[in-house]
Amino acid sequence: MKAIFLDRDGVINRYPGDTKYVTSWKEFRFLPNVKKAIALLAGKKYPIFVISNQAGVSKGLYSQNTLNDITSRMLKALEKSSAKINAVYYCTHRDEDHCSCRKPKAGLIKLAVKAKKIDLKNSFFIGDTIRDVHTAKAAGCKSILVFSGAEKPSNRDNWPARPDFTFKDLYAAAKFITTASS
């Protein structure tokens, strides 16, 4: 079975900006058509996982409890739109911690699929940065880069890795995935 892995900031919610974090629910803003996109994917019965670096916790910018609150409210808001996320996995470490779960490493994806029959080769990782493209490749997934967050098409010549697909946003990516597999 194929799964869908989603980065959070810049894919599900508005990208807060380079070196900035979403530190409260008040700052969390769903991007346009995200609920519709996740509902479309959930309607095809794909397991959907959020895979996100959230180093703001280890940097002391917000607490684990605040991150849990943001996540809980995000999931409740999505469920009201039939947009079910199966599980959320965060790495709260910093780069210098050299953990196995921080993207671009694939540790969180491995954790998400543990004991599940997921076909990674036919699964998709949707993110808004080249780091997400590296994560997809490290996990053996297809990569989709969306331009609703950090990365811009104008940077294409500088990308150290090429995504398998690019789309304007999560909704365009979801339409592609659900149409291609119909």
Image (cartoon, grey):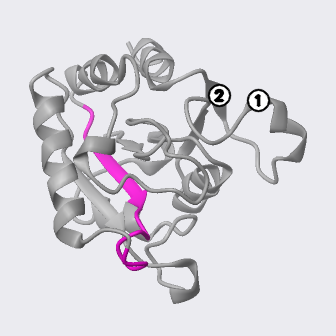
Question: Is disc 2 in contact with disc 1, using a CB cutoff of under 8 Å?
Answer: yes
Q: Residue 165 in magenta?
A: no
- In the image, residue 9 above or below residue 36: below
Q: Residue at x 55, y 52 (%)?
A: 136
Residue at the disc numbered 1: 153
Task: Say what secondary structure mark 2 lies in.
Answer: strand
How far across and how far down the image is residue 91, in percent? 38, 70
Question: Does residue 85 appear to the left or right of 11 in the view shown?
Answer: left
Q: Which residue is labeled 2 in the image?
A: 166
In this view, the residue in front, 91 or 100, is: 91
Image quarter where the N terminus lies is top left
Task: Tell me, for residue 70, which label it has, or none.
Answer: none
Quadrant position of residue 147:
top right
Q: Report the span colored magenta.
A: 46-60
Q: CA distance from mark 2 to mark 1?
A: 9 Å
Q: Main secondary structure of the magenta part?
A: loop
**Label 1 secondary element:** helix
The amino acid type found where label 1 is placed reads Pro
Q: Of the residues tagged 2 and 1, which is closer to the observer?
A: 1
| Disc 1 residue crowd, few under 14, some 14–19, many 20+, Cα 10 Å | few
Residue name at image x 27 percent, y 52 percent: 24
**How far across and down, in percent of the image, does residue 123 sit?**
44, 41
Q: Quadrant of residue 101?
A: bottom left
